[in-house]
Image (spheres, rainbow, N blue to C red):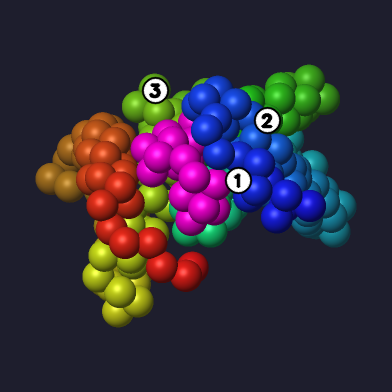
Amino acid sequence: MKHEHLEEAGGLSFGAFFARWMRFRREDMLAMLSFPVGFWLLLLAVVLIAGAVEGTADPEALGIPVALALVGGVFAGFIVGVGSAGVCFTLAICWGQPRRYGVAALWLSGILYGALNLLLAAVLQGAVRLFAPGSLDLLGRLPLVLWLALLIGPTAASVVVKAVLRRFGPKAGGWLYLVFMIFCIGIPNLDNVRGMDLRPALFAVLAVGLVAAGAVGSRWLLRTPVGND
């Protein structure tokens, strides 16, 4: 069935191309959205069981699974996005479409998923607050710039990773992993540096950096020869 799309996709407008792209990726999209829901249910069950074993009910803890499910959804979007930036981008070229169509479709579909992931987290948070008013509202504490980072982050990161791997080869993956680990280790240590909380500034830098890195990655995808992913 998917090979039929390869034969019929030439000469499409971007709107028609993007609609076909989304039909091609709908299973990935459903899988990515199912993951945070399943992850949330698992974490919620763990919290409820822990409370039952300890004999104490802590309504605040019910808000934690929502935040972790949001993060899980971001990682799911990133992991699937790396594959889409490779396989689906290559297919877009095989369909006879300009490379810019493939890059634009990657960004639009990724941002759409990011928005749905945030909306899903907000719905889950609302449901938890409805049945447990005393639960932590961790999402409400997030600064606006971090919401922006969560919206574009999975797409920007996946585009950057795939572009770097294509341009510099598999060995560049080690450097990308090192940067990721430095980032993960560094954030918790920025809450009190000389009495200042540097995390808001870091989140702003993160959002701007994701946009800039995504722009560079997109440019590399437009220019780097396409191989077998």
Residue at x 13% of width, y 45% of height: 194
Q: Which residue is mark 2?
A: 120
Residue in front for this viewpoint, 90 or 122 = 90
> Label 1 sits on what residue type?
Gly
Labels 2 and 3 touching (C-beta < 8 A): no
Q: Which residue is mark 1?
A: 73
Residue at x 17% of width, y 47% of height: 193
Is the residue marked by circle 3 packed among few (<14), some (14-19), or many (20+) residues within 10 Å? few
Closer to the chain start, of discs 2 and 3, is 2
Picture quadrant of residue 109: top right
Is the residue marked by circle 2 packed among few (<14), some (14-19), or many (20+) residues within 10 Å? some
Residue 112 percent across, percent down from the top left:
56, 30
Residue 195 percent across, percent down from the top left:
17, 40
Residue 1 percent across, percent down from the top left:
79, 52
**Camera sees residue 158:** yes
> Label 3 sits on what residue type?
Leu
How far apart marks 2 and 3 lie (CA) works out to 17 Å
Q: Which residue is mark 3?
A: 144
Q: Residue 91 in magenta?
A: yes
Q: How many marks?
A: 3
Closer to the chain start, of discs 3 and 1, is 1
